[in-house]
Image: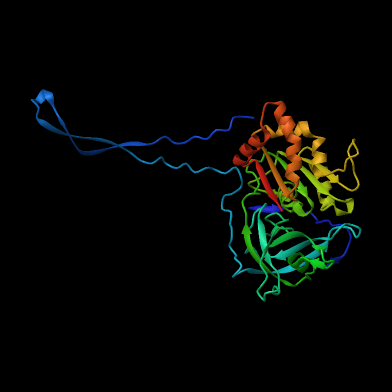
Amino acid sequence: MAAAVTAAVSFPSSKSTSLSSRTSIVAPERITFKQVPFYYKDVSAGGRVVSISAQVTTEAPAKVKKESKKMEEDVVVNKFKPKNPYIGRCLLNTKITGDDAPGETWHMVFSTEGEVPYREGQSIGVIPDGIDKNGKPHKLRLYSIASSALGDFGDSKTVSLCVKRLVYVNEKGETVKGVCSNFLCDLKPGSEVKITGPVGKEMLMPKDPNATIIMLATGTGIAPFRSFLWKMFFEKHDDYKFNGLAWLFLGVPTSSSLLYKEEFEKMKEKVPNNFRLDFAVSREQTNEKGEKMYIQTRMAQYAEELWELLKKDNTYVYMCGLKGMEKGIDDIMLSLAARDGIDWLEYKRSLKKAEQWNVEVY
């Protein structure tokens, strides 16, 4: 049983429609004995042929099921598929970036009536209305879920998304609008939405309530981390209380693009010992060298501390957003790891194998 505490969803005023060793143990072969005829000549019996029953056979090793460190138990995937999607309704659709931000981002809430049983870190698919240039229905697009499993209203009957409206000018000088993002950002309360999923296990939260969870997000990549943080700090659960450290790095181009800023600052006030918050605003901030403040630039200011955390078995890294961000983080860690005689890329592979390095980029 879980009950959400009262926590108002705050949005900016804008348009709104209503190194320890890592080892694995392989089970040894199990040896069994079967009785089968086996003949040999017994010299002591005068050369007579004597029959005995003795043969050793081996069975294949018993498979040991790897136990996940994440909250995978009873996770549902692909309950709804493109041929039979769930039909939800838009309950709320609000622009959460300022008017001077480079692009619009909207927060939207859809009804599910509890029929889409997702977990924090999963995604849903959305099939936009209409047909493509070939006269066929549009294909689904996947979006990371931005709400906890209880949902923004705390009743487990809604799902929320954080969507940036895609509009760009192509090489011909034509304005191109993303099909699904514009469909979603233009939704009015009461409109129907075709939903598939839920899908994904890569970004599920760790089971350990005392873990250190480092979250790295750019733009709408903040979605799964909002779901994590609501579960950690805005809700009360009988079977889960987070006592570890959650450290969020969020990178955006301008301060008017900071998503859910008021919510995160409220969390920091509430649990200062369990939540750290760092923004990287690339067009407005610089480091001491005068370099633009990208997410990896901000992380570099804490490089030593981050590396020490990454050497612990209960530290989990989650990364969501633009594809190029991981390389910038690799650049920070390469030299620090090398100083300790560690090959960073090899070590990162071991973290991935241990489910401690989780990436969802686009």
Q: Residue 227, image x and y in percent?
A: 72, 52
In the rendered image, the vertical position of residue 56 relative to residue 185, given as above or below: above
Residue 117 in view in this figure? no
Residue 279 in view in this figure? yes
**Which color scheme is applied?**
rainbow
Q: Residue furthest bottom?
A: 135
Quick one: 327 or 179, which is closer to the camera?
Answer: 327
Residue under the point 70% across and 29% down: 338
Q: Residue furthest front?
A: 172
Residue under the point 56% across and 53% down: 74
**Quadrant of residue 134 within the rendered picture:** bottom right
Q: Residue 292, image x and y in percent?
A: 87, 43
Q: Residue 257, image x and y in percent?
A: 86, 54
Residue under the point 81% across and 47% down: 251
Q: Residue 291, image x and y in percent?
A: 88, 40
In the rendered image, the vertical position of residue 3 relative to residue 139, given as above or below: above
